[in-house]
Image (tube, grey):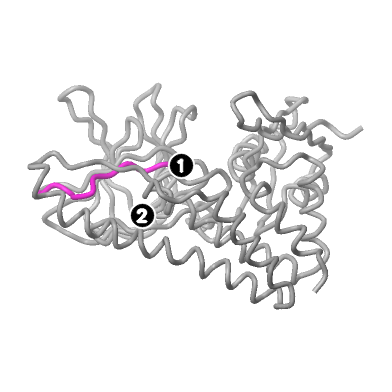
Protein backbone atom coordinates (compact mmCIF):
# COMPACT_ATOMS: atom_id res chain seq x y z
CA UNK A 1 0.00 0.00 0.00
CA UNK A 2 1.37 3.47 -0.81
CA UNK A 3 1.35 6.43 1.56
CA UNK A 4 -1.57 8.18 -0.15
CA UNK A 5 -4.19 7.08 2.34
CA UNK A 6 -1.94 7.51 5.40
CA UNK A 7 -1.12 11.07 4.36
CA UNK A 8 -4.78 11.81 3.72
CA UNK A 9 -5.88 10.25 6.99
CA UNK A 10 -3.70 12.72 8.85
CA UNK A 11 -5.84 15.52 7.38
CA UNK A 12 -9.26 13.94 8.01
CA UNK A 13 -9.70 15.01 11.68
CA UNK A 14 -9.09 18.64 10.73
CA UNK A 15 -11.29 18.26 7.64
CA UNK A 16 -14.22 16.96 9.71
CA UNK A 17 -13.79 19.58 12.44
CA UNK A 18 -13.45 22.47 9.96
CA UNK A 19 -9.92 23.36 11.06
CA UNK A 20 -8.06 22.79 7.78
CA UNK A 21 -6.85 25.62 5.61
CA UNK A 22 -8.57 26.14 2.29
CA UNK A 23 -5.66 24.50 0.44
CA UNK A 24 -5.64 21.43 2.70
CA UNK A 25 -9.41 21.08 2.45
CA UNK A 26 -9.14 21.20 -1.33
CA UNK A 27 -6.63 18.32 -1.19
CA UNK A 28 -9.12 16.15 0.73
CA UNK A 29 -11.93 17.15 -1.64
CA UNK A 30 -9.80 16.15 -4.63
CA UNK A 31 -8.86 12.84 -3.00
CA UNK A 32 -12.54 12.03 -2.39
CA UNK A 33 -13.33 12.73 -6.03
CA UNK A 34 -10.59 10.46 -7.39
CA UNK A 35 -12.47 7.19 -6.89
CA UNK A 36 -15.51 5.57 -5.34
CA UNK A 37 -13.19 3.66 -2.99
CA UNK A 38 -11.86 6.92 -1.62
CA UNK A 39 -15.37 8.23 -1.06
CA UNK A 40 -16.40 5.00 0.67
CA UNK A 41 -13.36 5.22 2.95
CA UNK A 42 -14.22 8.80 3.81
CA UNK A 43 -17.80 7.81 4.62
CA UNK A 44 -16.69 5.07 7.00
CA UNK A 45 -14.19 7.37 8.68
CA UNK A 46 -16.87 10.03 9.11
CA UNK A 47 -19.21 7.51 10.75
CA UNK A 48 -16.49 6.68 13.27
CA UNK A 49 -15.89 10.39 13.91
CA UNK A 50 -19.61 10.93 14.55
CA UNK A 51 -19.49 8.70 17.63
CA UNK A 52 -17.06 11.06 19.36
CA UNK A 53 -19.46 13.79 20.59
CA UNK A 54 -21.47 11.26 22.57
CA UNK A 55 -18.33 9.77 24.08
CA UNK A 56 -17.21 13.18 25.27
CA UNK A 57 -20.10 13.33 27.74
CA UNK A 58 -18.01 11.09 29.96
CA UNK A 59 -15.34 13.81 30.10
CA UNK A 60 -12.67 11.19 29.72
CA UNK A 61 -12.33 10.96 25.95
CA UNK A 62 -10.17 13.30 23.88
CA UNK A 63 -11.42 12.91 20.31
CA UNK A 64 -8.44 14.46 18.53
CA UNK A 65 -5.93 12.52 20.61
CA UNK A 66 -7.84 9.30 19.97
CA UNK A 67 -7.79 9.89 16.23
CA UNK A 68 -4.06 10.57 16.33
CA UNK A 69 -3.51 7.32 18.20
CA UNK A 70 -5.62 5.51 15.63
CA UNK A 71 -3.48 6.99 12.86
CA UNK A 72 -0.29 5.75 14.57
CA UNK A 73 -1.70 2.27 14.87
CA UNK A 74 -2.72 2.22 11.23
CA UNK A 75 0.59 3.59 10.05
CA UNK A 76 2.41 0.77 11.85
CA UNK A 77 0.54 -1.79 9.76
CA UNK A 78 0.81 -0.35 6.26
CA UNK A 79 0.51 -3.78 4.66
CA UNK A 80 -3.17 -4.23 5.56
CA UNK A 81 -5.88 -3.08 3.19
CA UNK A 82 -7.59 0.29 3.42
CA UNK A 83 -10.87 -1.37 4.22
CA UNK A 84 -9.31 -3.23 7.15
CA UNK A 85 -7.91 0.05 8.48
CA UNK A 86 -11.31 1.70 8.52
CA UNK A 87 -12.80 -1.32 10.26
CA UNK A 88 -10.18 -0.89 12.99
CA UNK A 89 -11.13 2.77 13.39
CA UNK A 90 -14.80 1.86 13.82
CA UNK A 91 -13.96 -0.90 16.29
CA UNK A 92 -11.82 1.38 18.45
CA UNK A 93 -14.56 3.97 18.68
CA UNK A 94 -17.26 1.37 19.39
CA UNK A 95 -15.69 0.58 22.79
CA UNK A 96 -16.14 4.02 24.42
CA UNK A 97 -19.60 4.27 22.88
CA UNK A 98 -20.63 1.05 24.60
CA UNK A 99 -19.14 2.32 27.85
CA UNK A 100 -21.24 5.47 27.50
CA UNK A 101 -24.43 3.43 27.12
CA UNK A 102 -23.72 1.55 30.34
CA UNK A 103 -22.80 4.77 32.10
CA UNK A 104 -26.14 6.39 31.33
CA UNK A 105 -28.06 3.29 32.41
CA UNK A 106 -26.20 3.18 35.72
CA UNK A 107 -26.74 6.86 36.44
CA UNK A 108 -30.44 6.64 35.64
CA UNK A 109 -30.84 3.78 38.10
CA UNK A 110 -29.12 5.63 40.96
CA UNK A 111 -29.97 9.30 40.51
CA UNK A 112 -33.54 8.91 41.76
CA UNK A 113 -32.26 7.63 45.10
CA UNK A 114 -30.12 10.69 45.76
CA UNK A 115 -31.76 13.63 44.03
CA UNK A 116 -35.24 13.31 45.59
CA UNK A 117 -37.17 15.09 42.88
CA UNK A 118 -34.22 17.17 41.65
CA UNK A 119 -32.85 15.16 38.73
CA UNK A 120 -29.36 15.90 37.52
CA UNK A 121 -29.38 17.42 34.02
CA UNK A 122 -26.99 16.51 31.24
CA UNK A 123 -26.47 17.87 27.75
CA UNK A 124 -25.51 16.17 24.50
CA UNK A 125 -23.93 18.40 21.85
CA UNK A 126 -23.56 17.52 18.18
CA UNK A 127 -20.42 18.79 16.41
CA UNK A 128 -20.72 21.14 13.49
CA UNK A 129 -21.23 19.13 10.32
CA UNK A 130 -22.11 15.95 12.23
CA UNK A 131 -25.24 13.99 13.16
CA UNK A 132 -25.35 12.42 16.64
CA UNK A 133 -27.71 9.57 17.52
CA UNK A 134 -28.43 8.33 21.05
CA UNK A 135 -31.20 6.93 23.26
CA UNK A 136 -32.79 8.43 26.38
CA UNK A 137 -33.57 6.53 29.58
CA UNK A 138 -37.19 5.87 28.55
CA UNK A 139 -36.18 4.32 25.20
CA UNK A 140 -36.83 7.46 23.14
CA UNK A 141 -34.42 7.70 20.19
CA UNK A 142 -32.89 11.06 19.33
CA UNK A 143 -30.95 12.32 16.32
CA UNK A 144 -29.17 15.66 16.80
CA UNK A 145 -28.25 17.68 13.73
CA UNK A 146 -25.14 19.78 13.21
CA UNK A 147 -24.46 22.38 15.92
CA UNK A 148 -27.41 21.27 18.06
CA UNK A 149 -27.73 20.38 21.73
CA UNK A 150 -30.31 18.59 23.88
CA UNK A 151 -30.63 18.98 27.64
CA UNK A 152 -32.46 16.27 29.58
CA UNK A 153 -32.56 14.73 33.07
CA UNK A 154 -30.75 11.48 33.73
CA UNK A 155 -33.92 10.32 35.44
CA UNK A 156 -37.34 11.52 34.22
CA UNK A 157 -39.99 12.74 36.68
CA UNK A 158 -42.96 10.52 37.44
CA UNK A 159 -45.48 12.64 35.52
CA UNK A 160 -43.50 14.22 32.66
CA UNK A 161 -40.54 13.54 30.37
CA UNK A 162 -39.12 17.00 29.66
CA UNK A 163 -36.22 17.94 27.35
CA UNK A 164 -34.89 21.25 26.00
CA UNK A 165 -33.63 21.63 22.44
CA UNK A 166 -31.37 24.16 20.78
CA UNK A 167 -30.86 23.47 17.08
CA UNK A 168 -32.51 20.59 15.25
CA UNK A 169 -33.48 17.10 16.35
CA UNK A 170 -35.59 14.15 15.24
CA UNK A 171 -37.41 12.19 17.95
CA UNK A 172 -38.86 8.70 17.97
CA UNK A 173 -40.69 8.90 21.27
CA UNK A 174 -41.28 5.75 23.33
CA UNK A 175 -44.98 5.55 24.11
CA UNK A 176 -46.08 6.11 27.72
CA UNK A 177 -49.66 7.38 28.11
CA UNK A 178 -49.13 8.12 31.80
CA UNK A 179 -46.04 10.22 31.21
CA UNK A 180 -46.18 12.69 28.28
CA UNK A 181 -42.97 13.63 26.48
CA UNK A 182 -42.37 17.39 26.20
CA UNK A 183 -39.87 19.24 24.01
CA UNK A 184 -39.11 22.87 24.84
CA UNK A 185 -37.94 24.61 21.66
CA UNK A 186 -37.47 28.24 22.58
CA UNK A 187 -40.91 29.69 23.27
CA UNK A 188 -42.71 26.74 21.71
CA UNK A 189 -43.55 23.62 23.67
CA UNK A 190 -44.51 20.29 22.12
CA UNK A 191 -46.34 17.54 24.04
CA UNK A 192 -46.57 13.96 22.73
CA UNK A 193 -47.31 10.46 24.04
CA UNK A 194 -45.52 8.35 21.44
CA UNK A 195 -44.68 9.55 17.95
CA UNK A 196 -41.92 10.60 15.55
CA UNK A 197 -41.29 14.20 14.55
CA UNK A 198 -38.65 16.77 13.64
CA UNK A 199 -38.07 19.99 15.60
CA UNK A 200 -35.94 22.97 14.54
CA UNK A 201 -35.05 25.84 16.87
CA UNK A 202 -31.66 27.35 16.04
CA UNK A 203 -30.53 30.40 18.01
CA UNK A 204 -30.98 33.54 15.95
CA UNK A 205 -33.79 32.19 13.77
CA UNK A 206 -36.49 33.64 16.07
CA UNK A 207 -38.79 30.80 15.16
CA UNK A 208 -39.37 27.12 15.86
CA UNK A 209 -40.57 24.49 13.38
CA UNK A 210 -42.22 21.11 13.90
CA UNK A 211 -42.68 18.48 11.16
CA UNK A 212 -44.81 15.50 12.16
CA UNK A 213 -44.07 12.12 10.59
CA UNK A 214 -46.24 9.80 12.69
CA UNK A 215 -48.69 10.14 15.58
CA UNK A 216 -49.92 13.42 17.01
CA UNK A 217 -48.36 16.39 18.79
CA UNK A 218 -49.93 19.22 20.79
CA UNK A 219 -48.42 22.71 20.44
CA UNK A 220 -48.60 25.49 23.01
CA UNK A 221 -46.63 28.30 24.64
CA UNK A 222 -46.48 29.69 28.15
CA UNK A 223 -46.40 33.34 29.22
CA UNK A 224 -46.05 33.28 32.95
CA UNK A 225 -48.83 31.01 34.16
CA UNK A 226 -50.96 31.64 31.06
CA UNK A 227 -51.04 28.79 28.55
CA UNK A 228 -51.77 29.56 24.89
CA UNK A 229 -52.89 26.50 22.92
CA UNK A 230 -52.17 26.18 19.19
CA UNK A 231 -53.88 22.84 18.64
CA UNK A 232 -52.52 19.58 17.25
CA UNK A 233 -50.67 18.50 14.12
CA UNK A 234 -51.47 15.55 11.88
CA UNK A 235 -48.86 13.43 10.06
CA UNK A 236 -47.46 15.23 7.02
CA UNK A 237 -47.93 18.70 8.51
CA UNK A 238 -45.36 21.36 9.31
CA UNK A 239 -45.95 24.08 11.91
CA UNK A 240 -43.92 27.30 12.20
CA UNK A 241 -44.01 29.33 15.41
CA UNK A 242 -42.84 32.95 15.19
CA UNK A 243 -41.51 34.47 18.40
CA UNK A 244 -42.36 38.05 17.40
CA UNK A 245 -46.04 37.39 16.65
CA UNK A 246 -46.48 34.39 19.03
CA UNK A 247 -48.55 32.73 16.31
CA UNK A 248 -48.36 29.38 14.53
CA UNK A 249 -48.98 28.71 10.85
CA UNK A 250 -49.18 25.17 9.45
CA UNK A 251 -49.00 23.54 6.04
CA UNK A 252 -48.86 20.13 4.42
CA UNK A 253 -45.35 19.02 3.40
CA UNK A 254 -43.34 16.05 2.14
CA UNK A 255 -41.70 15.04 5.40
CA UNK A 256 -38.63 13.35 3.89
CA UNK A 257 -37.29 16.75 2.86
CA UNK A 258 -37.10 17.76 6.52
CA UNK A 259 -35.85 14.47 7.97
CA UNK A 260 -33.34 13.27 5.34
CA UNK A 261 -30.47 14.88 7.24
CA UNK A 262 -30.51 11.91 9.64
CA UNK A 263 -29.01 9.78 6.87
CA UNK A 264 -26.53 12.40 5.75
CA UNK A 265 -28.76 13.75 2.97
CA UNK A 266 -29.72 17.29 2.04
CA UNK A 267 -32.88 17.78 -0.03
CA UNK A 268 -34.00 21.05 -1.59
CA UNK A 269 -37.29 21.34 -3.46
CA UNK A 270 -37.83 24.78 -4.93
CA UNK A 271 -36.27 26.39 -1.85
CA UNK A 272 -35.13 29.97 -2.14
CA UNK A 273 -31.39 30.54 -2.00
CA UNK A 274 -31.60 32.17 1.41
CA UNK A 275 -32.87 28.91 2.92
CA UNK A 276 -30.31 26.90 0.96
CA UNK A 277 -27.49 29.11 2.23
CA UNK A 278 -28.66 28.77 5.83
CA UNK A 279 -28.72 24.99 5.69
CA UNK A 280 -25.42 24.67 3.84
CA UNK A 281 -23.72 26.99 6.35
CA UNK A 282 -24.72 24.71 9.20
CA UNK A 283 -24.03 21.50 7.32
CA UNK A 284 -20.46 22.38 6.32
CA UNK A 285 -19.71 24.69 9.27
CA UNK A 286 -18.80 27.62 7.03
CA UNK A 287 -19.87 31.23 6.82
CA UNK A 288 -21.58 32.00 3.50
CA UNK A 289 -21.63 35.66 2.53
CA UNK A 290 -23.92 36.85 -0.27
CA UNK A 291 -22.35 39.79 -2.09
CA UNK A 292 -25.35 40.36 -4.40
CA UNK A 293 -28.76 40.42 -2.62
CA UNK A 294 -30.60 39.26 -5.78
CA UNK A 295 -29.03 35.82 -5.30
CA UNK A 296 -31.31 35.21 -2.31
CA UNK A 297 -34.33 35.23 -4.61
CA UNK A 298 -33.14 32.33 -6.78
CA UNK A 299 -34.94 29.00 -6.40
CA UNK A 300 -33.10 25.73 -6.03
CA UNK A 301 -33.93 22.03 -6.42
CA UNK A 302 -31.40 19.28 -5.70
CA UNK A 303 -30.47 16.36 -3.44
CA UNK A 304 -27.04 15.75 -1.94
CA UNK A 305 -25.45 12.81 -0.17
CA UNK A 306 -21.87 13.03 1.11
CA UNK A 307 -20.91 15.65 -1.47
CA UNK A 308 -18.07 18.00 -0.61
CA UNK A 309 -18.63 21.72 -0.21
CA UNK A 310 -16.89 22.33 -3.53
CA UNK A 311 -19.13 19.82 -5.30
CA UNK A 312 -22.27 21.47 -3.89
CA UNK A 313 -21.10 24.94 -4.87
CA UNK A 314 -20.30 23.78 -8.39
CA UNK A 315 -23.82 22.39 -8.70
CA UNK A 316 -25.18 25.72 -7.47
CA UNK A 317 -23.32 27.35 -10.35
CA UNK A 318 -25.12 25.08 -12.81
CA UNK A 319 -28.57 25.97 -11.50
CA UNK A 320 -28.16 29.72 -11.13
CA UNK A 321 -25.95 32.47 -12.59
CA UNK A 322 -23.64 32.61 -9.58
CA UNK A 323 -19.97 32.17 -8.82
CA UNK A 324 -18.15 31.60 -5.54
CA UNK A 325 -14.87 32.13 -3.75
CA UNK A 326 -13.64 30.19 -0.69
CA UNK A 327 -11.19 31.64 1.83
CA UNK A 328 -9.26 29.54 4.34
CA UNK A 329 -9.73 29.63 8.10
CA UNK A 330 -7.15 31.19 10.42
CA UNK A 331 -5.87 30.28 13.87
CA UNK A 332 -6.95 32.71 16.61
CA UNK A 333 -5.06 33.58 19.81
CA UNK A 334 -7.31 31.31 21.89
CA UNK A 335 -6.22 28.31 19.82
CA UNK A 336 -9.52 28.02 17.92
CA UNK A 337 -9.97 28.45 14.19
CA UNK A 338 -12.25 30.88 12.42
CA UNK A 339 -14.83 29.44 10.06
CA UNK A 340 -14.05 29.21 6.39
CA UNK A 341 -15.84 31.89 4.41
CA UNK A 342 -17.65 31.34 1.12
CA UNK A 343 -18.52 34.41 -0.95
CA UNK A 344 -21.38 34.12 -3.45
CA UNK A 345 -21.66 36.63 -6.26
CA UNK A 346 -23.46 36.99 -9.58
CA UNK A 347 -21.67 35.49 -12.52
CA UNK A 348 -20.89 38.04 -15.20
**Residue that appears at 24% across and 51% down:** 192
**Residue that appears at 71% across and 77% down:** 81
Q: Position of residue 182 (x, y in %)?
A: 25, 45
Q: Position of residue 258 (x, y in %)?
A: 50, 51
Q: Nearer the viewer, residue 150 or 103?
A: 103
SS at circle 2: strand
State left or right for residue 236 relative to residue 20.
Answer: left
Q: Is residue 271 visible?
A: no
Instruction: Spot the residue most to the front.
Output: 76
Q: Position of residue 307 (x, y in %)?
A: 70, 56
**Residue that appears at 34% across and 26% down:** 246
Residue 131 on the magenta segment: no
Q: Residues within 10 Å of mark 2 (few under 14, many from 20)?
A: many
* Vertical relation: 93 (above or below) 26: below
Instruction: Spot the residue most to the right.
Output: 348
Q: Which residues are magenta?
A: 148-158
Number of the front mark, 1 or 2: 1
* Vertical relation: 252 (above or below) 38: above
Q: Which residue is mark 1?
A: 148
Q: Which residue is mark 2?
A: 171
Of pointers 1 and 2, the one earlier in the residue sequence: 1
Q: Nearer the viewer, residue 142 or 94?
A: 94
Amino acid sequence: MDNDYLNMEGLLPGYLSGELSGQERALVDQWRLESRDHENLYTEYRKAWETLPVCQIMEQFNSFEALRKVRKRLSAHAAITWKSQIQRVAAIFAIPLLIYSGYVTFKNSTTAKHQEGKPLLQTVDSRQGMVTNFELADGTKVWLNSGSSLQFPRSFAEDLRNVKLSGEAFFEVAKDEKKPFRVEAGGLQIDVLGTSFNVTNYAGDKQAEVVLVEGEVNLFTMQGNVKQEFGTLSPGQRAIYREDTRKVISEGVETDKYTAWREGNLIFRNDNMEEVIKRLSRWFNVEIIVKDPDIKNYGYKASFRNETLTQVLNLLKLSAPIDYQITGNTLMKNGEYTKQKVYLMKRE
